[in-house]
């Protein structure tokens, strides 16, 4: 697998986190039941059923977009783990890199800008590289 740079991964990670989970409202209009009519020439019951179906379709699409977003973030995090492992070297394992990434994410959970965790990742990479190289 190709090892990506942290700068590349940072862009992908931030883009994935900022990806909207709200569907295009021209394709998936969301109706407020009782306040909008789809077709004024049709019955109230028909309009109610159409609004209910449209709202369900909208919610289903939101859910689908959330799943796609989550899967994309997981794939990027796998790449981050591989990059951490590669950058640190000295026999540092992917399992150790995964634990490190989770710690960084937990400690950095307050950041609204998800790109800021990459500063912590770079600091930890430098620290571990220094510590592991000292034992040689």
Image: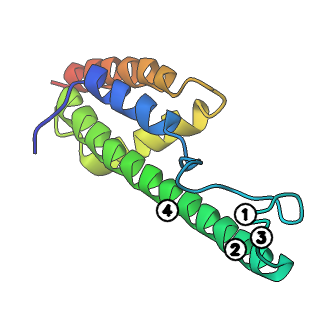
Q: What kind of element bears circle 3?
A: loop
Q: Which image quadrant for residue 55?
A: bottom right
Decide: is 55 above or below 115: below
Determine the secondary structure under disc 1.
loop
In the rendered structure, which disc, 4 or 1, sits on the residue that comes first in sequence? 1
Q: Which residue is mark 1?
A: 38
Task: Give the residue number, with chain letter if any, for mark 2.
Answer: 50
Classify 10 Å Cα crowding around label 2: few (below 14), some (14-19), many (20 and above): some
- Residue 57 lies in quadrant: bottom right
Q: Position of residue 127 (x, y in %)?
A: 36, 19
Q: Is residue 120 above or below residue 35?
A: above
Q: Of the residues tagged 2 and 4, which is closer to the observer?
A: 2
For label 4, the residue is 64
The relative height of residue 59 versus residue 25 in the rendered view (above or below) is below
Mark pair 2, 3: CA separation? 13 Å
Cα distance in 3D space between marks 4 and 1: 25 Å
């Amino acid at each position: 697998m190709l090892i990506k740079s942290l700068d590349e991964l940072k862009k992908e990670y931030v883009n994935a986190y900022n990806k909207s989970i709200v569907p295009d409202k021209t394709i998936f209009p969301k109706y407020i039941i009782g306040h909008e009519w789809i077709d004024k020439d049709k019955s109230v019951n028909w309009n109610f059923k159409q609004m209910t179906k449209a709202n369900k379709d909208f919610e289903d699409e939101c859910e689908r977009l959330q799943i796609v977003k989550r899967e994309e973030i997981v794939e990027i995090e796998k790449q981050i783990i591989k990059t951490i492992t590669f950058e640190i070297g000295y026999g540092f394992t992917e399992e150790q890199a995964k634990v490190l990434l989770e710690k960084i994410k937990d400690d950095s959970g307050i950041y609204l800008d998800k790109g800021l965790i990459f500063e912590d990742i770079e600091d930890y990479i430098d620290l571990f590289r220094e510590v592991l190289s000292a034992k040689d």
